[in-house]
Amino acid sequence: MSADALLEVASISAGYRRVVILRGINFTLAPGERLAVIGANGAGKTTLLRAIMGQIPLSAGQIRLAGEGLDSASIAARARAGLGYCPEGRQLFPMMSVAENLELGAAGAGAAARMRRREAVLEIFPRLQPLLGRAAGLLSGGEQQMVAIGRALMGEPRILLLDEPSTGLAPRIVHELYAALARLSAVAILVVEQNARAALRFADRAIVLADGAIVAAAPAAELRDDPLVVSAYVGAGRLAPA
Amino acid sequence: MASIIALVILGLLWGGVYLLMAEGLNLIYGVMKVVNLAHGDLIVFGGLLGYSLFAHAGFTPIAALLPVALVLGALGAVVQWGILERIPLVGADGELRTLLATFGLSYVVSNTSFLLWGGQFQSIPFLQGALRLGPIAIPEGLLACSLAAFIAALLVDFWLHRTLAGKALRATAQSPLGAASCGLEIRRIRIIAFALGTAMAGGAGALVIALVPFQISSGGDLTVQSFTLIALGGLGNYLGAWIAAEILGLAEVLSQYYLGPDIASAIIYLLFIAVLLFRPQGLLGRLGRV
């Protein structure tokens, strides 16, 4: 394991019942680093995040957070250990207000800490300020995604795990979302994305998954210029600078 | 006119009692999607426990409410931890498994009641006078029990909506994965929800036995009555249950007065069928869900 790795994913295999999806995945994430995982539909991107969060068991390998094995930890225990998770479908509490959603993200903290963290989240997503009293289920897709990320940030995570944050959002909102994420310097971010263009622009480093295995790993800038990656996952000519 | 006002008041008061009876079932369904078929038997168990507290220690139904709720809550926590938590809820058979488990539990509870209290009807004489408001007479026992039920339901409502622990429970009902991602141990929350649901059932039983005599076989009817109410309000819908309880109370009292007691008991089932046919999502649909 590299000495400065915050998260180490070591030779993990995982899947659903007897179907193996991930095969021998290896990578590390350093503090403050931004790592994108891209790949086609069904490549195993979401399964990777589920395995890291303990939603599905590993059939081989190990996951360590700051050197501590997470094997027997529940999803909640992993969240408390510092993994801020925005799962597929956002998983907000739709009948509760935005303020309550954020509050529950820091359920283990005291009232003063919750208030301080909420202010910090509202600085990152000022668009949420006038929506605090509104039910989360009534917000637009982009606003819901901001609440989901804000809720994860309320736990002051060491790593933010984002599952397809741009799904269903207009390009302008995707840009706004990634611009906000780019301002988070204190937290490492692991983002899995179908929207490879946005992910590769945002990340420091990226890995490409295909059929549950890593087929390429390199600095994001290099992958942005790789014609094979461009044609397979981004679309030729779509990586030109904005 | 006075008789209609009296009937409406009686109906609303019965609604308060029904609310407490069904609210525990609603909470358990809202959080865990488990239809607890032992709910009525737990109400009867709570009522008979209240009867023992009255017979041996002189507890009134209102004084018995808290100790009975605590005992039933502890029992519920053990059942959830020891049985339901170990049954896989996911998959096509998930709901069937929990239905069978709670069906079995209803037998265990009713037979335990039989061993402890026998098969005869039991009741508690409590405030048997009437409060007179001009020409309107309101039974004091019903008034006291209904107020106690309303206060208990309001306290639970306050806990659910104003405390962090209550919000955590509602959050788990709305998205278990979202709650777990917030660091909330949903297994513990499910145990709390089931314990609270059975505590409310027990507390309701301690009150209702002063109004309606209980016998161990009363549990089945109470389960259906509670289920009708939460179906009318919308499964897992807290606000809907309040409205449905009042509708049910009014329908029962008015039909009993105008159509007779035999028709009155059928009215509840007719209402239930009408809801399933025309408004299967309940009166309020998604609005007001736990």
Image: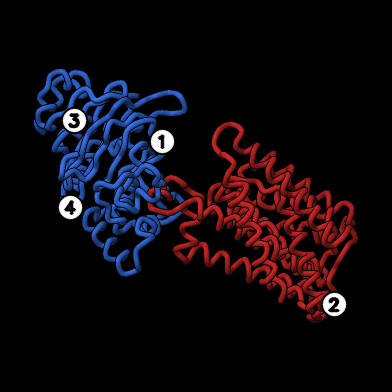
Chain colours: A blue, B red
The quadrant of the image that shows the N terminus of chain A is top left
Q: Amino acid at mark 4?
A: Ala
**Mark 1 touching mark 2, by CB under 8 A?**
no
Q: In 3D space, how far apart are the residues under numbered discs 1 and 3 (Cα atoms)?
A: 31 Å
Q: Position of residue A178 (x, y in %)?
A: 20, 42
Q: Position of residue B148 (x, y in %)?
A: 68, 72
Q: Is residue A122 left or right of residue B210?
A: left
Do the residues marked 1 and 3 share a common chain?
yes
**Mark 1 touching mark 3, by CB under 8 A?**
no
Chain ID, mark 2? B
Residue plotted at (28% across, 30% down): A11
Residue of label 2:
B128
Q: In terms of image quadrants, where is residue A16? A: top left
Chain ID, mark 4? A
Disc 2 crowd rating (10 Å Cα; few below 14, some 14-19, many 20+) is few
**Mark 3 touching mark 4, by CB under 8 A?**
no
Residue of label 4:
A186
